[in-house]
Image: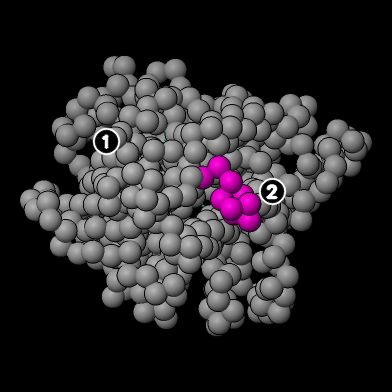
């Protein structure tokens, strides 16, 4: 990695955006419309963020295609056609590239360049941003569009380098693809990525051995080709549907039932759960309005899915291992699959429980658990991410008085609205911790943040205010509120990545905001309308006048 050598800016712009995923692309588009000069830095060779990196077999979105797309341009949403109900990773990546082409975004994006540091200069009210290629850019605003799941994580097993076969992480899948035909493959992990990848890998590989620490609840996607009449119906009603999604609980139209699972008879409850199971996808969790609030309601839904797993998997011992028992359904990210459980009926697929006897080491030929050696040609790490904070704290971000973001967030992320953090003026986060982000349709939340940030920057410009910073009291109150609403739900009881539980030593803090996408949007709008309540606005001119 080339280290920056010069301390003099090689470029001066109004804004630097870090990342060219869906957040960075739309942010660039909006800032251009304000006539701001903007430079985007992107570590990859192309646009797409999550969908650029996660190319593992079977990768696809859990939100329906008609809803997982930008809504800001009528032209874009009318002209683009999705081929399947749930789009695959290659198709979503094609869509990201299409948007970049249509809006002519690439000329302001520097690819293959990672931002390594950003420091705030208090006197100038500007950020100095440095990259691994030696760029030093001075910017009024620094906008982190770094994604919530962008720092892939492998466990640090002893002997990681000793394995002679191939290793892959789902979040860094080789762009040229991988041919696993005829190979003996070990897959570590059973989260969303693994649950999508395992059925596809099993069709190629000679043998697949899955190492499972925690079984997960998964709902069949019922994916299929896009029906022309379904697409037409969506396109005809897009404005109303998008408006509804923006004000919904999680940015996805799930046709939610607004009554408790306990308010209906046992027979009616089962009928509704069966209807949702047959419909497929995450709409399952909207079968009742209290599945993540009431343990009894949750137990009923969880038991229903456990019954499904037992009926799908032929070998009773394997079925029992695959049946989640240690967390309420939905409190670890609910998975959506195509034939995941049925895959364990194949002769070439084996499940190994590592909940009590963990993987101890990688060896030359595979891996070792106790005295048992497992030999592989390839090992797939589907072991997740240092979610929500990992990417931000790995960048050397220094705010006022040289305080680093990593130090400030040592006991867990602290933000005001998930948009800014006190002590770091003019630094915005798109879908930062403390916002609905990963509990929502990411594109809905991305658009809401980008629109809010754009309006904020425009308002500051119009009033010749060149500095905005979250106030510490407002931030403390927001963090307390984020916690309060989280602890009214069943979520914190699970060892999930929402809680930082997947990273040894990471503080246990519920990171996203669970108060609902619609409520959150209204709160953000009210704060802006109230002259950015909870933020401190100032300008160099005022500071000079006050001296
Ligand atoms: P993940 O949900 O964090 O799953 C990681 C898996 O690896 C877990 O099963 C975990 O077990 C296991 N693991 C980690 N370290 C291990 C170790 N030392 N030994 C054995 N097992 C180990 O990661 P992911 O599957 O990549 O998904 C992350 C998130 O990305 C999802 O929750 C979702 O939000 C998003 N995603 C979405 C889609 C989609 O829209 N379709 C697809 C993929 C990912 P434990 O559970 O015991 O920690």
Residue labelled 1 has its Cβ within 8 Å of some atom of ligand 1: no
Of callouts 2 and 1, which one flags the residue occurring earlier in the amino acid sequence?
1
Q: Is residue 502 visible?
A: no
Q: Residues within 10 Å of mark 2 (few under 14, many from 20)?
A: some
- In the image, is residue 502 part of the stretch drawn in magenta? no
Residue located 47% across and 49% down the image: 537
Please, what secondary structure does the residue beneath circle 2 have?
Answer: helix
Q: Nearer the viewer, residue 311 or 78?
A: 78
- In the image, is residue 529 part of the stretch drawn in magenta? yes
- Disc number for residue 519: 2
Residue located 46% across and 52% down the image: 430
Residue located 73% across and 70% down the image: 240
Residue 203 position, x and y percent, is 42, 54
- The residue labelled by disc 1 is 402
Identify the magenta region.
Answer: 527-535
The CA distance from mark 2 to mark 1 is: 35 Å
Residue located 32% across and 70% down the image: 37
Residue 1 position, x and y percent, is 12, 49
Point out the quarter of the image occupied by ligand 1.
top left
- Disc number for residue 282: none
Work out whether 243 lies above or below 356. below
Q: Mark 2–mark 1 contact, CB under 8 Å? A: no
């Amino acid at each position: 990695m080339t280290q920056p050598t010069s301390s003099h800016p090689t470029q001066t712009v109004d804004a630097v955006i870090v990342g060219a995923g869906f957040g960075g692309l739309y942010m660039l588009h909006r800032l251009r419309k304000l006539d701001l000069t903007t430079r985007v830095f992107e570590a990859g060779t192309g646009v797409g963020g999550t969908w650029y990196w996660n190319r593992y077999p079977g990768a696809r979105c859990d939100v329906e295609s008609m809803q997982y797309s930008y809504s800001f341009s009528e032209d874009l949403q009318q002209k683009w056609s999705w081929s399947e109900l749930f789009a695959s990773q290659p198709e979503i990546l094609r869509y990201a590239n299409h948007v970049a082409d249509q809006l002519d975004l690439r000329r302001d994006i520097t690819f293959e360049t990672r931002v390594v540091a950003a420091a705030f200069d208090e006197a100038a009210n500007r950020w100095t941003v440095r990259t691994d290629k030696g760029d030093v850019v001075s910017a009024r605003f620094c906008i982190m569009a770094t994604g919530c799941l962008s720092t892939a994580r492998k466990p640090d097993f002893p002997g990681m380098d000793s394995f002679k076969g191939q290793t892959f992480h789902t979040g860094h899948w080789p762009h040229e693809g991988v041919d696993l035909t005829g190979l003996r493959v070990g897959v570590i992990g059973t989260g969303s990525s693994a649950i999508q990848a395992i059925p596809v890998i099993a069709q190629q590989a000679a043998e697949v051995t899955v190492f499972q620490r925690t079984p997960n609840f998964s709902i069949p996607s019922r994916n299929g080709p896009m029906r022309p009449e379904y697409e037409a119906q969506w396109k005809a009603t897009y404005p109303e549907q998008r408006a509804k999604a923006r004000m919904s609980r999680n940015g996805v139209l799930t046709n939610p039932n607004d009554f408790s699972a306990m308010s209906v008879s046992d027979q009616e409850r089962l009928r509704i759960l069966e209807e949702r199971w047959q419909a497929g996808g995450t709409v399952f969790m909207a079968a009742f309005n209290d599945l993540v609030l009431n343990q009894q309601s949750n137990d009923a839904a969880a038991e229903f899915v456990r019954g499904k797993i037992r009926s799908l998997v032929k070998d009773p011992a394997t079925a029992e291992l695959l049946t989640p028992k240690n967390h309420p359904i939905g409190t670890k990210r609910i998975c959506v699959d195509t034939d995941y459980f049925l895959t364990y009926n194949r002769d070439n697929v084996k499940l190994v429980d590592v909940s009590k006897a963990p993987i101890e080491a990688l060896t030359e030929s595979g891996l070792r658990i106790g005295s048992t050696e497992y030999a592989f040609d390839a090992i797939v790490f589907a072991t997740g991410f240092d979610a929500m904070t990992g990417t931000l704290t790995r960048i050397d971000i220094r705010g006022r008085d040289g305080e680093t973001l990593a130090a400030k967030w040592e006991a867990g992320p602290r933000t005001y609205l998930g948009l800014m953090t006190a002590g770091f003026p003019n630094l915005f986060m798109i879908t930062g911790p403390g916002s609905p982000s990963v509990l929502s349709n990411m594109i809905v939340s991305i658009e809401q943040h980008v629109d809010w940030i754009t309006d904020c920057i425009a308002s500051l410009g119009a009033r010749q205010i060149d500095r905005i910073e979250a106030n510490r009291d407002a931030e403390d109150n927001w963090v307390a509120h984020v916690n309060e609403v989280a602890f009214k739900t069943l979520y914190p009881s699970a060892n999930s990545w929402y809680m930082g539980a997947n990273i040894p030593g990471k503080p246990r803090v519920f990171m996203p905001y669970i108060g609902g996408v619609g409520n959150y949007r209204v709160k953000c709008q009210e704060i802006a309308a109230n002259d950015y309540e909870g933020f401190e606005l100032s300008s160099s001119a005022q500071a000079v006048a006050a001296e």
